[in-house]
Amino acid sequence: MSLLGRLFYKSRKFYDDDFDWNSYTEDSYKRRIETDIESQFQAVAQNDQLGFDAASGHVTVSGSDMHPNHLLILEAIGQLQPKSVHEVGCGGGDHVANGQTLFPQIAFTGGDRGQTQLDMAMSRHPELKDAVALQDITMPLSRHWPRAEFVYSQAVLMHIHTAVSHFVGLANMVNLSDRFVLLMENYQCHNFIADIQNLRDGGHFDWPELYIYRFDGSTGARAILLSREKLDLPEIESDAQIREGLTASDRRLKRSDEDSARGIFGPKN
């Protein structure tokens, strides 16, 4: 989105997404990887640099630190031990590659709506050739998309604001998963808990039961974890709980409320 567009976004009925996805790789993503992530953290780990301690549930990293959000994703996978994992919005493929490195017994796949994103993933991780493919999670659910026991997103849904697209993305993620959905997002960009509850109560999820938990990483990051089964984790019932301790952004919270108000859900049971 152009600077002028950002300044005047309030005048539009349905806000645009945060980025022009056709130019996202060159305009923003590649620069963010190089300047925001790789300048401070280890984005890609080698075979001997990652370890998982089953007793504590923590991932250990040798060499440079890994970003807390990225570490949390690996810790959730390690603790829940799914047989398969799928990343929605896999971008440059680093999370998929790190997951394969740390947990070779688990099948990893990834999808992204941009071919330039997948091209970047191939350049960074040629070994992922058969593991990643095009996928727009805001399209109607496709039977060709890979199912997995554990489906997650990392900074994806938070950028989607056009019409009801983020609702479609949330529903698709749940309906592609056999056990767990992890949302590693900015929790002020959408009313994630309220939206999930409305989608659940409106019959938009295939799961017979859905539990909403807060999952905390060992280095301070937090995530929303949806599960089909009861877990020994703190349940959350409101967006205030997942936002606790965060510095409030009035602009983001206002936009979240407006995004939520566009939802028209199926009748409750």
Image: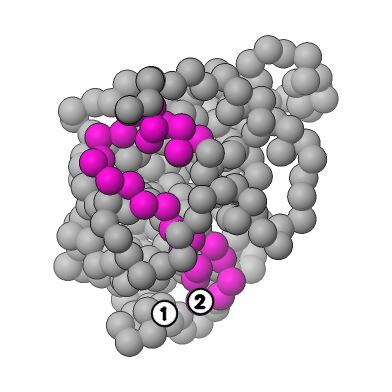
Q: Quadrant of residue 11?
A: top right
Report the residue that reaches farthest toward the front. Answer: 269
**Residue 236 belongs to the span the image colors magenta:** no
Looking at the picture, how far across and down is residue 152, in whole percent? 38, 50
User: Along the line of sight, which residue is nearer the eye, 36 or 234?
Assistant: 234
Indicate the secondary structure of the residue bearing disc 1: strand
Front-most of residues 60 and 203: 203
- 19 to the left or right of 98: right
The answer to whether residue 118 of the structure is visible from this angle is no
Instruction: State the mark number for residue 58.
Output: 1
Task: Give the numbered dot on residue 221.
Answer: none
Q: Residue at x 45, y 38 (%)?
A: 197
Residue 223 is at least partly visible in this image: yes
Question: Looking at the rendering, which quadrant does residue 81 occupy?
Answer: bottom left
Q: Which residues are magenta?
A: 195-222
Cα–Cα gap, marks 2 and 1 = 6 Å
Q: Quadrant of residue 19?
A: top right
Work out which quarter of the rendered image holds the C terminus and state it.
top left
Measured from the top left, where is residue 104 in percent x and y?
A: 21, 68
| Residues at circles 2 and 1 in contact by the CB criterion of under 8 Å | yes
What numbered label is drawn on residue 218? Answer: 2
The residue at the point 37 percent across, 66 percent down is 76
Q: Amino acid at mark 1?
A: His
Residue 63 or 259: which is nearer the viewer? 259
Residue under the point 43% across and 21% down: 265
Its colouring scheme is: one colour
Which residue does the image show at 48% across and 18% down from the upper left? 264
Crowding at label 1, few (<14), some or many (≥20) Cα neighbours within 10 Å? many
The amino acid pointed to by label 2 is: Ser
> Would you place residue 129 above or below residue 112 in this image?
below
Secondary structure, mark 2, is: loop
What is the x, y in percent for residue 71? 47, 68
